[in-house]
Amino acid sequence: MSNSKWVIRRRYICCIMLVLALLALVACQKEAAESTPDTAVVEETIAEGGNLVGSWQMKFGGTDLLSKSGLVLAADGTFTYLGQRGETLDSGKYTIDGDQLSLDGTPCTSSGGVKVSPCVGVYTISVTQSDTTTIMTLQLVEDPSLNRSLAFGGQDFVLVQ
């Protein structure tokens, strides 16, 4: 067999193997999508009886991995914002009015570098639930705290206790 025919056959075989690999990948993804349980996701707000008391850990953007950073909402109306090492970054009182969460924390630093007190941040809450997971999403309405607004705005939190 001549050398040029062998090169053409190798290319042909490689192309066929690539097409088969792509077809297998598509089939696996379709099977995975079909086997994913169709969770009954329920949007609720606190006004409709949801309960946000507990420890919430932040999700790393776009993944199911949890950060050590989080937000603890206690039954007595206090909150604690925890950093990556478990340290308290902010604490104070929280209130809920309809689907709005207000955090009244320690004096904070604004984006302009000015100390602000009182430091009340307001976020819209949405909660989604499946059989195994409760996720709270906070959307920034306003918050003079640069640290909180950057960390919490648009952030998903998973209820861990």
Image: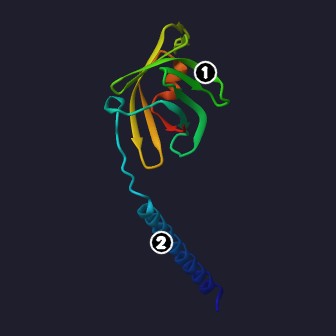
Report the residue marked by disc 2. 23
Q: Secondary structure at mark 2?
A: helix
**On screen, 161 above or below 150?**
below
Mark 1 residue element: strand
Residue closest to the far bottom: 1
Say above or below: 5 vs 134. below
**Who's the residue at 48% across and 25% down the image?**
75
Q: Indicate the position of residue 47 as horizontal and vertical percent values.
A: 32, 28
Residue at point 53% right, 75% down?
A: 15
Badge 2: few (under 14), some or many (20 or more) residues near its Cα, within 10 Å? few
Label 1 CA crowd tier, 10 Å (few <14, some 14–19, many 20+): some
Position of the N terminus by quadrant = bottom right
Task: Give x and y (percent) for residue 41.
Answer: 37, 47
Q: Residue 126 location, x and y as percent?
A: 38, 34
Quarter location, residue 6: bottom right
Name the residue nearer the viewer: 57 or 55.
55
The mark total stands at: 2
